[in-house]
Image: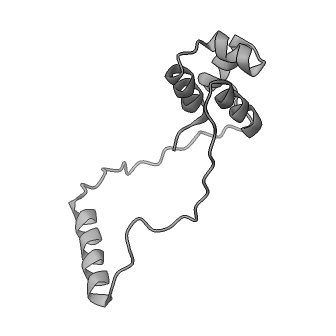
Amino acid sequence: MTTPPALIRAVRRRNGLTQRELARRAGTTQPVVSAYEHGRRDPSLGTLRRLVEAAGERVVLDARRPGPDVPPARDDAERARRLLDVLSLVDAIAPVPRSTRLHAPRLVST
């Protein structure tokens, strides 16, 4: 997934435009384009579309229902193998040593 700052910068560079030229084409100013590219401002979808189209490209949105990265297990045996794999990974991770001392702010009454 591309962020708006990265998208604006990439589209502008792909089309050989300076921030000033993109701003002129989109009807805004160079400092505003810079702020979008550096993430200091968040463009609305309409503004993002206007900037991308001013550079000669178009925005295409795609929405998908989130799904699992791994296909579902075929049977109980495969579920068991996956569980053992996960548990083996957990055992392989070294435990983080924890302090037995409680660190809390000191309360002082006035």
The x and y percentages for residue 97 are 30, 50
Instruction: Quadrant for residue 83, please give it.
Output: bottom left
User: Which x, y percent locates residue 104?
Assistant: 54, 44
Residue at x-position 56% and y-position 32%: 7
State whether residue 28 is above or below residue 62. above
Q: Is residue 55 above or below residue 91?
A: above
- In the image, taking residue 89 as reference, residue 53 lies left or right, namely right
Dividing the picture into quadrants, the one containing residue 43 is top right
Residue displayed at 61% across by 32% down = 57
Residue at the (50%, 24%) spot, across then down: 14
Q: Quadrant of the C terminus?
A: top right
The scheme the figure's colours follow is one colour
- Left or right: 24 in relation to 99: right
Question: Count the marks: how many?
Answer: 0
Is 85 in front, or is 47?
Answer: 47
Q: Please give left or right for residue 65 compared with residue 43 in the image.
A: left
Percent x, y of residue 107: 65, 40
